[in-house]
Amino acid sequence: MPKDPQSDIPARFRVAKTTLLVDRFMNQFIKIGGLSIIVAVFAIFVFILAQVIPLFRDAKVEELKAVQLDAAEYAILGIDEWSELPFALRTDGEFLFADVIGERGLTRKSLPFVTEHGFGAAHYNQLAQRVAIGTRNGKFALVDLHYRPVHAPGGGRSITADPRPGPLYDIGRPGAPITHIAYADAGARKLAVVKQEPAENGGPVELHAVSLTQRRGLVGGGQISVDRSFDLTPLVPGTIDRFLVPAQADAVVVATTEGEIIYLFRQGDRFVVRQTFRPFPESPGPLSTFNFVFGDVTLVVGDQAGSLKGYSLYLAPGAEQRLFGHTKTFPAQKAPGTVFANSVRNKAFVVGSGSHADLLFSTTEDRRWGKSFDFAVTHAVIGGKYDRMVFLDDKHVLHFYRLDDPHPEASFRAFFGKLWYEGSPAPRFDWQSTGGSDDFEPKLSLVPLIFGSLKGTFYALVFAVPIALLAAIYTSQFLKPEIKTVVKPVMEIMASLPSVVLGFLAALWLAPIVETRVPSILLLVTLVPFSAFALGYLWTHASPRVRVLIPHGWEFLVFIPVLLGVGYAAWQMGPALERLLFVVTDPSTGARVADFRLWWPTVTGTPFEQRNSLVVGFMMGFAVIPIIFTISEDALSNVPQSLRSGSLALGASRWQTAFRIVLPTASAGIFSALMIGLGRAVGETMIVVMATGNTPIMEWNIFSGMRTLAANIAVELPEAPHHGTLYRTLFLGAMVLFLLTFLVNTLAEILRQRLRSRFRSVE
Amino acid sequence: MALARPSDFAHASAPAPGTFNPAYIQVKNFSFYYGHNKVLHSLALDIPERQVTAFIGPSGCGKSTLLRNLNRMNDLIDGVRHEGDITVGGRSIYDPLLEVIALRKRIGMVFQKSNPFPKSIYENVVYALRVAGRNGKSELDEVVERSLRGAALWDEVKDRLHESAFGLSGGQQQRLCIARAIANRPEILLMDEPCSALDPIATSKVEELIHELKKEFTIVIVTHNMQQAARVSDRTAFFYLGKLIEYAATPDIFMNPKNPQTEAYVSGRFG
């Protein structure tokens, strides 16, 4: 047994073993506790970071299989929605289906009508899995591919295709060969457009369109028939090169060999030229790339030098129609982009030029992936789930690639920069994570949310800081201590009110009152402080005979009734003020009405909403006031009595002592109080979720709402699929919030230390 | 004794040279309570003008309490109450019509522990003028130099007037507080054990200063140090357990005390 080190010490000097044990235990316990807090905070940060980092990864692409096709010319390349059975259409009208998953190899399907009439041109609609084929003699037919999964009896599943042509329709000049075709089906509206070259050698090129209708019977769709024919040739100056028909089937966008684009729009029973423009005025000549990205709103055009631009349809301010405008500039290609395929899941597209291919994302202008092959690409297609890519090369080899790009719409610019979204007249910061349609473009800018957080915090602090600080100064410096012992715990109870209750009150009780009583509130916030100042002035100039009636520390007995009276009067006078100042013509009735809710938008041009910053300011201020009050009151009360005595003994008034000595000395503590209040306001969630309307707007207007980072996480988390882009973007929002508070707290701590050393009081 | 009317208070005229009011401050049958605890028992004494009066006595005898009552600093404490009266220049300091701020401008105070404000040396000195709304640069500069010279601190700090007062040593800080107290030229200077936290060198400087200041101010000093009382004061009051035991010219108290308690205290037998 080891010798007890205390054995040679007299018993009365010995330390009890339990004392030593407890001391050592507590030492270790506190160390472990402190360290694990630091580790926990760090681990949270690392976890959030791990959720966020995949957003900024590029696409990963790897080749899975290569299949040798027939040595023939191919018109189009397509793929089924499972990405298992891509096809290529030979220019002699034979479909080649390549089984890239199973062992079935190549399957051939030829269409009798093509053999009969000759192959002219084809157009592939990947979403509908339909091919429009124009013939050598001025007819066209729609071929449904009929992809479907077949389940084998012993388990396992394979995809089969069964291209079935519909009826043949006549289009344009009878008998003239079709050299280009486009078809769009928007349900009630269907439009087919063809380019015909009646004389093979240098004859005039013609552009014809037909609209189709489908008679609807009681049971299902009926036969589709030609409704009306249009000759579009006279509308196009120059030589027709190519054209596109948007999915809405209401327009034709034609590119000429001179590099000009003509936007033809259908109005009733005729087409009109809505817009003519040259995307590359400096390099005339046929466009290399001329295609829509998914949604058919953005046009990707490329010139012969490899420049690539995006043109989007939008309504410019003051314009009456949506026209194409230059919105995107993509990374330039080394060679003209002759091969194009767009994703049918998002705004990604692949551009091939020679042996190089780039995967680009339209919204962010971002290059997701790029590769130089050892073959020349002639055709490309992107799988329906944006998970496969297929290329066809000039040696007739079909290359099947896996595409792993879960977050194509994410980029630093998408989160923090201005982007020119489709349909928007200018680049902007926007948050709109989900939309109603498949071709919706997610808008993931965090800037409006950061702005919202700052706006909510600003209005809360504007309301809370003066009240809380003045209350703290009054309570610590002027109020009788026996009243102070009541006031302080009451304020602390106020701090413990659940914010969901405050939010509920704000949304359902306060907001409707504030909405109709804005003039009263204006009067209240001006008259009450003013009357307080006026009363203070009168009080100091009152005869000492009056003042001795109220002992020091009890002055509030005079003030409170007066302020309550003024407050009541201000509230009651609000409607009168409204009738006096806020009279405006009601746009719906034309009558002159006194209504602030109409006056504000008429005069300032900014909206007036019921759930606005004023309400949030009040309620969040209510949540923040007790915190700022309690901490700053402590700081003020902790200023050494000797400093106050010193100041008073020099003939300073209590007010002068409070402002010249106590306030500067307590400034470090008051600063902490403000920062803790700020932190509470920035992170506050429930009040803003319930009382702001959650509109992600960027304006300081006090009568409109906001969406804060914290509220955004609460509102959108239920809609965010696990590990999806939105899910990770919400984590990015959380990280921004984390960094924001971290930054503010660090700055505050540095400033606080400086204040503290400057106003260090006598020890 | 000159009977001053209330209106005289703010413009108390300096008496003719050599004629000092022997009862400038009168404590009249003054009792003082902290809550129910009576700490001063019916005190009565007259403090002469432009002399140094020392209050001595063991701890808890009430000497500081009386001193702090002279400029009503005890008002800041809760649950205090008094009986009797104190007059300065013939006027009660408890007159409800009297501004306590004006009273404190007239009666400067130096505390036991130096308490410079967290400001520069310059701003510490001119504080009394600033709160009175006097901000003229030339006046303030003049007051700073005069007050710091008066507190025998000028030569030590004249090159760093705008540095923090916390950079000064303890003795310098206390002299700064004296400079601050005399900046607005009060009539009376109350000193509550001004040297208790100072080393002997700093103490002797402050004592020399008190000798100088006597020419201009009426000084009341509370001290534990009987040698100090003997060195600096003209009259000495000995308190014990809240009662005034003996009050006489300083040499009489120390050389020829009438009361045996006084004798016991000044000869160091208790205290």
Image (cartoon, rainbow, N blue to C red):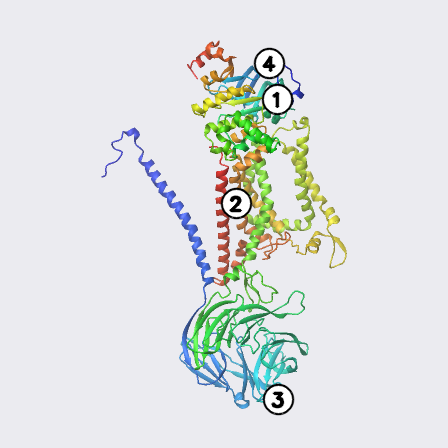
Dots 4 and 2 on the same chain: no
Gap in angstroms between the C-alphas marked 2 and 3:
80 Å
Q: Earlier in the sequence, mark 2 or mark 3?
A: 3
Which quadrant is the N terminus of chain A positioned in?
Answer: top left
**What kind of residue is marked 4?**
Thr
Query: Of helix, strand and loop, which one carries label 3?
Result: loop
Gap in angstroms between the C-alphas marked 4 and 1:
27 Å
Tell me the tag on residue A675.
2
Q: Callout 2: residue from which chain? A: A
Query: Of helix, strand and loop, which one carries label 2?
Result: helix
Gap in angstroms between the C-alphas marked 4 and 3:
137 Å
Gap in angstroms between the C-alphas marked 3 and 1:
120 Å
Q: Is residue B79 visible?
A: no
Residue that carries the numbered disc 1 in the rendered image? B94
Query: Of helix, strand and loop, which one carries label 1?
Result: loop
Residue that carries the numbered disc 4 in the rendered image? B19
Tell me the tag on residue A174.
3
Q: Crowding near pointer 2: few (<14 within 10 Å), some, many (20+)? A: many
Q: Tell me the mark number nearer the camera, choosing from 4 and 3.
A: 4
